[in-house]
Amino acid sequence: MNQTMTTTMPVPSCPPRPLFLHQLAVLFVCGATALAATGQTPAPSPARSASGSIRIENPQEKADLATRIDEAIQRAKTKNAPTTSAGGRRRAEPIPSVEVRIPAERPSKSAKTMAIPQAPARPAVQDPEASRRYIQTRAAELAAAVPPPPAPPPPDPRTVRWDYGSGDRGPKAWGNLHPEFAACSQGMRQSPIHITAQDVEAGPAPLLAFDHQFFGGTVLHSGHGLELKVEGDSILTLRGMPWRLVRLQFRHPAEERVHQHNYPMATDLVYQGPEGQTAVVSVPMQLGSTNTFITRIWTHMPLDVQDSVRLPQPVLSVDELLPQDRRYYQYAGSITQPPCTEGVLRIVMKNPVNIGLAQLRLLQRLSPPSARPVQATNGRLVLEAQQARGAALTWPAT
């Protein structure tokens, strides 16, 4: 739809100045207005281009148009010159107005019909398998170019949860719970073992020289069993060196089996050598009379996990615990809980001592079973030491 905007404006006074082609349109309007005021017929209008601009091609026409515009401007000035009124004042005649019609621009047809360029069609995959192989190869190259992030450090082994049960934290899984527990599943000299006649060789062995010092300590429920942290000096002379007693562990059932026999309980005395070595003296226990040594400890029994009770004074002596017949078995083994460290000297007393039924039941009531299953001997030698109380070790009688 064509729209015409009509604007009425006064004819400006057009001062004579040099003419330029781009001013011809404005001067033409001024001249046409002046000619209309004088009644003269204007010259033919110059041709308009498709864009609406005035185009004058003939030089003569350009000159004639310029002359006519100048004459029209002079006549307009003369006509509009102020006149003198009756009172002696000059009166200016009103400036004629010119109606200019500006046709609205029509939208370009080319803009409506302009087609939106389409994206080129993707070529069809000729060989999907080849494309898949390429993607896999490229992905592998990119993965190899970027180093993987460093693995997080393992947790503190002391915070790793484990137990003696049959689940995913039990003895069969200990080796997978922490890198430092690898010996639990890969070690070749693990404890406990089943001591059988085919593994035992009898012969002389060092004398177990326990001192007679009394000691005390703190009874603790660790969550894995009941133990006593020793306070004071209780020394075992072994292999010509002093070994200091650091801990007692009360286990049910006993860990080592001896000639197919399983004992319901054992007390393990853990010693530390002068160079950090570890030796464990295990005293098996069988049901019988009340054990005085155990009574002194059970009197200060803790009641819950992580509960502890300190003995009021040093009232314990190893002599009160050990059997009179101190012959023993000896072999190279390990500790029997994570991290299952090897290089431990294991000593198992050949003869058990008694434990009262009520004493055993109290331990069973307080803590779950705390014995690791027996491990393979892997051809290890078990030495049976022949020793009588207070006597030197001798070869067994043949």
Image (cartoon, rainbow, N blue to C red):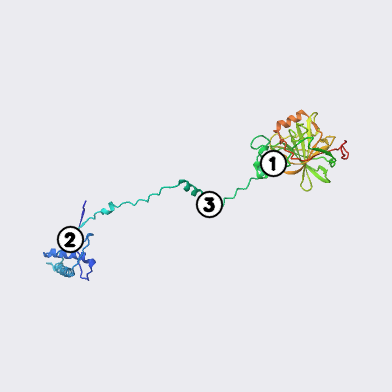
**Element type at mark 3:** helix
How would you rate the neighbour count of disc 1 (Cα within 10 Å): few for under 14, some for 14-19, many for 20 or more? many
Q: Residues within 10 Å of mark 3 (few under 14, many from 20)?
A: few
Numbered disc 1: secondary structure: helix
Is tag 3's residue or tag 2's residue first in the polypeptide sequence?
Answer: 2
* Number of the label disc, if any, that sits on residue 141: 3
> In 3D space, how far apart are the residues under numbered discs 1 and 2 (Cα atoms)?
110 Å
Looking at numbered disc 1 in the image, what kind of residue is underneath it?
A: Cys
**Residue 352 location, x and y as percent?**
80, 33
Give me the C-alpha separation between circle 3 and circle 2. Answer: 80 Å
Q: Which mark is residue 98?
A: 2
**Quadrant occupied by the C terminus:** top right
Residue 270 vs 68, above or below: the answer is above
Determine which residue is flagged by label 1.
184
Q: Whole-percent x and y of residue 46? A: 18, 64
How far across and down, in percent of the image, does residue 115 sit?
A: 31, 51
Please say whether residue 365 is visible from this viewpoint.
yes
Disc 1 vs disc 2: Cβ atoms closer than 8 Å?
Answer: no
Q: Nearer the viewer, residue 124 or 165?
A: 124
The numbered mark, 1 or 2, whose residue comes first in the sequence reads 2
From the image, state whether disc 1 or disc 2 is nearer to you. 1
Horizontally, residue 398 falls left or right of residue 75, namely: right
Badge 2 density bin: few <14, some 14–19, many ≥20, Cα 10 Å: some
Q: Secondary structure at mark 2?
A: strand
Tags 1 and 3 touching, CB below 8 Å: no
Amino acid carrying label 2: it is: Val
**Residue at mark 1 to residue at mark 3: CA–CA distance:** 39 Å
Amino acid at dot 3 = Glu
